[in-house]
Amino acid sequence: MAKINYEIIKQIAVLSESKSGWTKELNLVSWNERGAKYDIRDWAPNHEKMGKGITLSEEEVFALKKCLTELDLHF
């Protein structure tokens, strides 16, 4: 399997943390030396391992923000 290169350009937020120390984070990440995208995924401590996640372009982040703002959330 080909090695995946990544660079976390900006750490934006930790969304949650599991008992094992892994964190679900929102970051700006460059994958394989390409332009950075917004990324939500689980990370091991020190970011040496990662889980499956989702990457979003800036346009997709704006669309998601709009949808979340319009939601009528009741907690």
Image: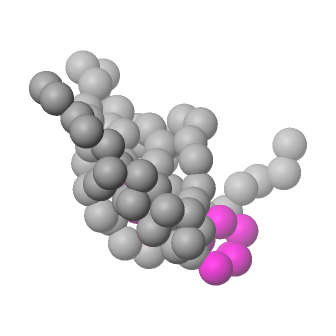
* Quadrant of the image occupied by residue 66: bottom left
Q: Which residues are magenta?
A: 26-35
Vertically, is 21 above or below 28?
above
Q: Main secondary structure of the magenta part?
A: strand
Is residue 45 visible in the rendered image? The answer is no
Q: Report the side of 51 relative to 8 (left or right).
A: right
User: Residue at 69% across / 77% down in the picture?
Assistant: 34
44 or 69: which is nearer to us? Answer: 69
Most extreme residue toward the left is 75
* Quadrant of the image occupied by residue 43: top left
Query: Residue 22: x and y, percent?
Result: 34, 33
Vertically, is 1 above or below 2?
above
Quarter of the image that includes the C terminus? top left
Is residue 56 visible in the rendered image? The answer is yes
Most extreme residue toward the right is 1
User: Residue at 37% across / 72% down in the picture?
Assistant: 10
Query: Residue 45: x and y, percent?
Result: 34, 41
User: Residue at 52% across / 73% down in the picture?
Assistant: 58
